């Protein structure tokens, strides 16, 4: 079986190792959702990853609700990302752009409009806004006649990502955001072609992924799913059947790889509610499968050894250890991340985690 240090082909991308950097929202952009020079250093520090999956990046003003998050719907944002990709490539790295529509998790104080979702539902808890945390507001259901425009937004964001120099894109269909809100039956109460049966609830994921793949090529298109448990109030009564069907649809498109964020029942950042769904997904998906959530070097290697995964995406460990593959290779102790600085906008907890000395 392969080791974490062995290369892997992910569609059109030849990754030199199987230690991928998971997408990590960090909040270091401008209020206009434009990447900043500080982000160039952050991503370049982590260029030794087999592949960097960028932080979630808004495809449109409608779908973007995270303060100081990045967008990729206009030329200024695209230029900001281009500085990052050029530096990552110069350092020998590879990077793809995660495309994001937040759906009902968008707050009107950030977006300027009422959020949209599969159905008229409200996210639980409170939203991050520029004025502090505020309760979510009820979303309006997306109309069927709005779907072509949504697909156009994904196509345009994909074209911008390639203009910005990314090696590909990942469709964010996880973590309780728009596509996930369509997928799962506790947030999708539609009675049209996008609701009810599992094939109908998978329809938007399939259409978005196909639109992106038609724009950039299936071999430069990836998808992220979160198949197990509640994420931002979104859940499903039969995740095994739902996500196996989703995986089969994505396999038919021929995407480069599928990433799963699936914590265990004892997860440290979210908890699974049922036994792992990944095996059912792997059985239905004919392509590289990347697992993510709470993995260390030993547990990640075990997942490869047992054939449960083809690569592992590391999040918080990459946040605090920019040279993570080197530390794994040399058995150097890992630095802990500081949660208080995850979204603090400053250099602290962002670009000041040092590389190992040896």
Image: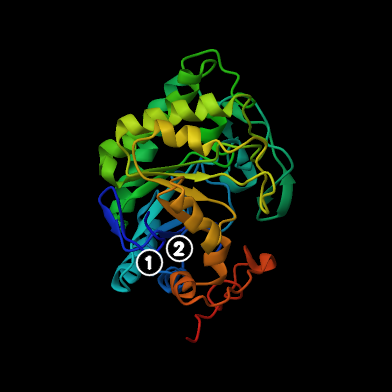
Q: Residue at x 60, y 37 (%)?
A: 228
Question: Going by the image, does 41 lie left or right of 166?
Answer: right
Residue topped by disc 1: 84
CA neighbours of label 1 inside 10 A, class few (<14), some (14 to 19), many (20+)? many
Q: Reading the chain from its start, which is encountered first: label 2 or label 1?
A: 2
Q: How many marks?
A: 2
Above or below, comparing residue 345 to residue 55 in the picture: below
- For disc 2, the marked residue is 35
**Horizontal relation, residue 19 to residue 28: left or right:** left
Residue 18 location, x and y as percent?
39, 59
Q: Residue at x 28, y 47 (%)?
A: 11
The correct choice, above or below, for 351 with respect to 289 in the image is: below
Instruction: Please indicate, yes or no, whether residue 318 appears anywhere in the rendered image.
Output: yes
Select label 2 or label 1 by which is in front.
Answer: 1
Residue closer to the observer: 147 or 342 = 342
Q: Residue furthest top?
A: 191
Residue 100: mark: none
Position of the N terminus by quadrant: bottom left
Does the CB distance between marks 2 and 1 fall below 8 Å?
A: yes
Q: Which residue is depicted at the point 55% across and 13% down?
A: 191
User: Horizontal and vertical percent for residue 164?
Assistant: 31, 58
In three-dimensional space, the C-alpha distance between marks 2 and 1, rounded to whole angstroms, equals 8 Å
The answer to whether residue 22 of the structure is visible from this angle is: no
| Residue furthest bottom in the image | 357
Count neighbours of disc 2 (C-alpha within 10 A) and say few if under 14, some if 14 to 19, many if 20 or more.
Answer: many
Q: Position of residue 51 (x, y in %)?
A: 38, 59
Q: Nearer the viewer, residue 331 or 209?
A: 331
Q: Is residue 79 above or below residue 143?
A: below
């Amino acid at each position: 079986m392969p080791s974490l240090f062995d290369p892997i082909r992910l569609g059109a991308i030849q990754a030199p190792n199987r230690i991928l950097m998971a997408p990590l929202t960090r909040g270091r952009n401008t209020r206009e959702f434009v990447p900043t020079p500080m982000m160039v250093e952050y991503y370049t520090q982590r260029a030794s990853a087999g592949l960097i999956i960028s932080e979630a990046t808004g495809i449109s003003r409608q779908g973007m609700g995270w303060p100081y998050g990045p967008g990729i719907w206009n030329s200024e944002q695209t230029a900001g990302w281009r500085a990052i990709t050029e530096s990552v490539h110069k350092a020998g790295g590879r990077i793809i752009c995660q495309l994001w529509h937040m759906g009902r998790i968008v707050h009107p104080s950030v977006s300027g409009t009422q959020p949209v979702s599969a159905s008229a539902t409200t996210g639980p808890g409170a939203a991050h806004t520029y004025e502090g945390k505020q309760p979510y507001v009820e979303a309006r259901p997306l109309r069927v006649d709005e779907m072509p425009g949504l697909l156009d937004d994904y196509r345009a964001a994909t074209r911008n990502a390639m203009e910005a120099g990314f090696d590909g894109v990942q469709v964010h269909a996880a973590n309780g955001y728009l596509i996930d809100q369509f997928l799962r039956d506790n947030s999708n109460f539609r009675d049209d072609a996008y609701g009810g049966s599992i094939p109908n609830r998978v329809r938007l994921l399939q259409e978005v992924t196909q639109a992106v793949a038609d724009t950039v090529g299936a071999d430069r298109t990836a998808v992220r799913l979160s198949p197990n448990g509640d994420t931002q109030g979104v859940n499903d009564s039969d995740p095994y059947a739902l996500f196996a069907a989703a995986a089969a649809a994505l396999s038919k498109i021929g995407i480069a790889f599928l990433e799963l964020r699936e914590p265990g029942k004892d997860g440290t950042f979210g908890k699974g509610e049922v036994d792992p769904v990944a095996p059912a997904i792997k059985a239905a998906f004919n392509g590289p499968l990347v697992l993510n959530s709470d993995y260390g070097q030993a547990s990640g290697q075990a997942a490869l050894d047992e054939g449960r995964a083809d690569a592992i995406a590391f999040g918080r460990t990459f946040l605090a250890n920019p040279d993570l593959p080197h530390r794994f290779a040399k058995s150097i102790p890992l630095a802990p991340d500081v949660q208080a600085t995850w979204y603090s906008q400053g250099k602290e907890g962002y670009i000041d985690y040092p590389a190992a000395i040896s």
